Amino acid sequence: MKEITTVELQTMLEKGDVLNLIDVRENDEVAEGVIPGAKHIPLGDVEARMEELDKTAEYIVICRSGGRSGRATQFLSDAGYDVTNMVGGMLEWNGKTE
């Protein structure tokens, strides 16, 4: 499974890289703040909503600590998507949120 740290992701965003982010946390968690531009797809909805994703695009998957995003990353990877897990999750995120 591909992984990216919160620092690596923050650096890429600050450089202006255009990234596809998926936040798999629950609604109440997302209400506390998300990384700007992240698409919210709760973990339980990933399978039903994966047709919303483009198999030719790269995605970075985010959750609270990195566990749920790891499961989503593995599932989507097995389904043929190019996905990377953000290790440490929002607990380690020090960048901007909205």
Image: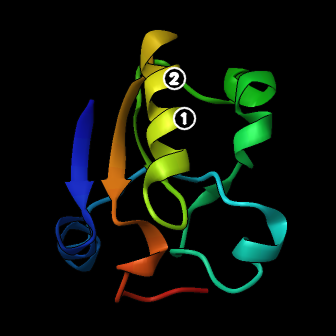
Q: Residue at x 54, y 67 (%)?
A: 64
Q: Check disc 1 and report its element: helix, strand or loop.
A: helix
Horizontally, residue 84 falls left or right of residue 98, namely left
Instruction: Check the image and tell me how it is coloured.
Output: rainbow
| Quadrant including the C terminus | bottom right
Q: Relative to residue 68, is residue 10 depicted above or below?
A: below
> Whole-percent x and y of residue 4?
23, 53
- Amino acid at pointer 2: Leu
Categorize mark 1 by other alpha carbons within 10 Å: few (<14), some (14-19), many (20+). Answer: many
* Label of residue 76 in the image: 2
Q: Relative to residue 40, is residue 43 depicted above or below?
A: above
Q: Relative to residue 63, is residue 24 depicted above or below?
A: above
**Foreground residue among 31 and 51:** 31
Q: Residue at x 17, y 66 (%)?
A: 8
Q: Which residue is mark 1?
A: 72
Q: Are marks 2 and 1 in contact (CB under 8 Å)?
A: yes
Q: Residue at x 45, y 11 (%)?
A: 78
Q: Residue at x 82, y 74 (%)?
A: 28
> Whole-percent x and y of residue 95?
36, 87
Count of labels shown?
Answer: 2
Horizontally, residue 90 falls left or right of residue 52, namely left
> Whole-percent x and y of residue 7?
19, 74
* Label of residue 6 in the image: none
- Amino acid at pointer 1: Ala
